[in-house]
């Protein structure tokens, strides 16, 4: 892997979420790369106001802008519900900075949300004896999920929050621009295949990466035991996918793509959706198989020093998992957060309907943001006890 611009795509892929516990699959990020971080300030309050789709959309838009600023390059990223982490090489830092500023303006002007953005050099993380290591999970032929370990992403986030001016993108002499092409938000909320969708976050607490790998292996084995394999617990089923045909439901995408929510724009989008829906229903061209391509390209299970999953299951299964995780927490091994909902929310980045694409999945009505709140409370409780 001598060509740093092809660093991510040259990593040999793993094929199962359970493989994230094998450290031989990880590679160190090049020291001259940078970490792009975004997160919606006050996301919990916004979600309590029912604005969870807006929060998800702004986070997904920030990833879209980054991917478009490095056209032709495969870069690692992870969607966190109310924010994102993206790794970029030094050659595109200037372009990425402008795209971040433009996304920040979009969040403020179109969604009345305050988006924190920053670019942290990997060298600053390494200087603190932290590491950022990456594996590549092949989710489908069209989507490769980045998997992060080493503690470096969390440390970079702390650096940004402690000194936002130092890591802010440089101001622009001209209005900053971002390309949001590919961003889509045209699906209704998707009902759970079973009783509910569980949005789950689990973070191991051991300072040893090797020990943490053992903890995560045990957690994943227990999830398999309770919920079955990833296909069985998948939160998105083809039979439950329905396009949003109410023009008002298309406003979110219109705000991002064109900043124009006029009736003319919404009706044009509706016409496109109706045509796509017809093609999928009657198998016009290759469209009959598109929903399967979509389901195969979702990010419903991932890892960035925290295990993040959206799982479809039954309340009894959730109770069994909570019992197990609570025992692990009491033993000082993990902290965790859960949020349940009847539906999943999906926000999409589609560059090719039959090729490169990713569909970001979160639990509806708060998902990852509210699961994170529970996990943070557990962390605060632990710190108070140790103080």
Image (tube, rainbow, N blue to C red):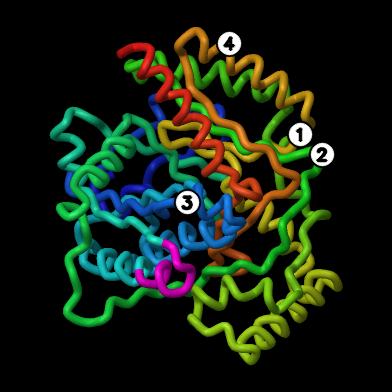
User: Would residue 35 be seen by someone viewing this image from the given angle?
Assistant: yes
Q: What distance separates the C-alpha of mark 1 from that of mark 3?
A: 26 Å
Provide residue 373's location: percent of width, then percent of height. 50, 36
Q: Are marks 4 and 1 in contact (CB under 8 Å)?
A: no
The residue labelled by disc 1 is 313
Q: Residue at x 72, y 62 (%)?
A: 188
Instruction: Place residue 49 in its image quadrant.
Output: bottom right
Q: Quadrant of the N terminus?
A: top left
Tell me which residue sits at (26%, 45%) in the image: 161
Q: CA distance from mark 3 to mark 4?
A: 30 Å
Gap in angstroms between the C-alphas marked 4 and 1 = 21 Å
Q: Are marks 2 and 1 in contact (CB under 8 Å)?
A: yes
Percent x, y for residue 138?
53, 44
Give the answer, above or below, for where 299 lies relative to 221.
below
State the CA–CA distance, disc 2 to disc 3.
28 Å
- Please state the extent of the stretch shown in magenta in the rendering: 105-113
At mark 4, the secondary structure is helix
- Residue at disc 1, secondary structure: strand
Mark identifier at residue 327: 4
> Can you tell which mark lies on residue 43?
3
Q: Residue at (75%, 68%) from the top-left corner?
A: 243
Q: Circle 2 is placed at which residue position?
A: 194
How far apart are labels 2 and 1 at the CA level?
A: 5 Å
| Alpha carbons under labels 2 and 4: distance apart | 26 Å
Query: Label 4 neighbourhood size at 10 Å, few (<14), some (14-19), many (20+)?
Result: few
**In the displayed image of the protein, which residue is found farthest to the right?**
282
């Amino acid at each position: 892997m001598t060509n740093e611009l092809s660093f991510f795509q040259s990593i040999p892929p793993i094929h199962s979420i359970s493989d994230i516990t094998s450290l031989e699959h990880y590679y160190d990020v090049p020291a001259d790369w940078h970490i792009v971080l975004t997160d919606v300030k006050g996301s919990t309050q916004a979600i309590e106001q029912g604005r969870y789709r807006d929060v998800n959309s702004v986070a997904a838009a920030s990833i879209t802008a980054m991917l478009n600023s490095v056209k032709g390059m495969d870069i690692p990223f992870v969607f966190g519900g109310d924010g994102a982490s993206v790794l970029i090489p030094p050659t595109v830092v200037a372009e990425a900075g402008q795209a971040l500023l433009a996304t920040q303006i979009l969040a403020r002007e179109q969604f009345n949300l305050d988006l924190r953005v920053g670019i942290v050099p990997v060298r600053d993380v390494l200087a603190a004896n932290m590491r950022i290591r990456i594996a590549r999970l092949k989710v489908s032929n069209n989507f490769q999920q980045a998997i992060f370990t080493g503690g470096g992403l969390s440390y970079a986030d702390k650096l940004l929050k402690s000194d936002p001016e130092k890591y802010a993108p440089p101001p622009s002499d001209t209005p900053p621009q971002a390309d949001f092409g590919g961003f889509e938000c045209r699906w209704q909320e998707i009902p759970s295949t079973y009783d509910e969708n569980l949005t789950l976050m689990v973070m191991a607490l051991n300072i040893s990466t090797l020990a943490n790998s053992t903890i995560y292996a045990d957690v994943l084995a227990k999830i398999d035991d309770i919920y079955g394999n990833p296909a069985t617990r998948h939160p998105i089923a083809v039979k439950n996918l329905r396009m949003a045909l109410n023009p008002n439901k298309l406003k979110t995408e219109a705000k991002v793509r064109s900043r124009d929510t006029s009736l003319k724009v919404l009706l044009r989008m509706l016409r496109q959706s109706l045509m796509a829906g017809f093609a999928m229903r009657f198998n016009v061209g290759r469209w009959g198989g598109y929903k399967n391509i979509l389901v195969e390209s979702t990010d419903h299970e991932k890892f960035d020093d925290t295990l993040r999953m959206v799982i479809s299951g039954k309340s009894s299964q959730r109770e069994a998992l909570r019992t197990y995780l609570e025992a692990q927490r009491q033993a000082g091994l993990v902290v965790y957060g859960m949020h349940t909902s009847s539906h999943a929310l999906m926000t999409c980045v589609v560059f090719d309907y039959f090729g490169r694409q990713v569909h970001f999945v979160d639990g509806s009505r708060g998902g990852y943001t509210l699961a994170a709140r529970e996990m943070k409370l557990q962390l605060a409780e632990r710190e108070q006890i140790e103080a």
